[in-house]
Amino acid sequence: MAQSEEELLKKRLLELADRAYERNQYTFSGFLSPGEVNAFYEIEGQIAYINYELSGGVEQAERVMIRFGSEGMFGYLEEFPIICLIVEPLMKKFSEPLTHRDFLGALMNLGIERNTLGDIVVKGAKAYLFCMDSMADFIMENLTKVKHTHVRCVRSKEIPEEVKPELKEETILVSSERLDGVIAKAYNLSRSQAVEIFREKRVFVDGRLCENNSRVPKSGEVVSVRGFGKFLYVGREYETKKGKSAVKICRYV
């Protein structure tokens, strides 16, 4: 994200926070990428006067919206304007293998702005698309084809079990609990490769950019490494006879 774009985003988010506070009503951002969320955290100290919450419609979503305001402040609760659409082939036996890029490309070809779309989770022949409720009807009427496969879109009444995150427990041995060492072991990298990932600003802890490769993660924190995946850090389990630490992580699969 260019610096000018980042500054415009920060200004827009500050305006949303101000509007919510002044009018005593909820305001919502569009869907934000991890980098944009980190830009928001950089101005978090400037909006201490109002509560906020993040959601992408499902736990650990990559793209999320910000809701400014709270039930405690306003006396009522307004849900996030997020809809989950199920996109499936009209005739499964004639459908082709489709990827996240295929679904996103088809949506972009409709002229839809990226910030109206959240995560797209592809499971087999289906895709689960999170979007703003204001875009749901347009997408259902106009998304009729992805590549060469004819599709239909239907609203999901609740969040399908298929899109909820799956966690796979794993115990890894590290010489120390430093984050670069944990990441190196988790993704089969050398320590120098892990350090380079930090230099490239690809490591996020609970949505915040982390540039301190010697940081020791806390139990319950979610570590996301762009290009590799993410895991929940559970913590140290025991020390081996050779002095190494056995730590448990739960990998998102």
Image (cartoon, rainbow, N blue to C red):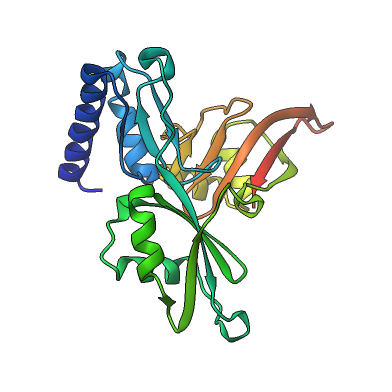
Residue at the far right in the pictured view: 241
Q: Is residue 155 above or below residue 90?
A: above
Q: Is residue 238 toward the left or the right of residue 203 in the image? A: right
Q: Nearer the viewer, residue 152 or 189?
A: 152
> In the displayed structure, would residue 125 be above or below residue 33?
below
Number of numbered discs overlaid on the protein picture: 0
The residue shown at (46%, 46%) is 62
Quarter of image, res 47 = top left
Q: Position of residue 169 (x, y in %)?
A: 74, 43
Residue at 41% across, 20% down: 76
Q: Nearer the viewer, residue 70 or 54?
A: 70
Point 35% across, 70% down: residue: 142
Q: Between residues 99 and 70, which one lies in front from this camera angle? A: 70
What is the quadrant of residue 95 in the picture? Answer: bottom right
Query: Which percent across, then down, holds residue 180?
Result: 54, 39
Answer left or right for 102 relative to 92. Answer: left
Q: Position of residue 107 (x, y in %)?
A: 36, 66
Above/below status of 8 relative to 253: above
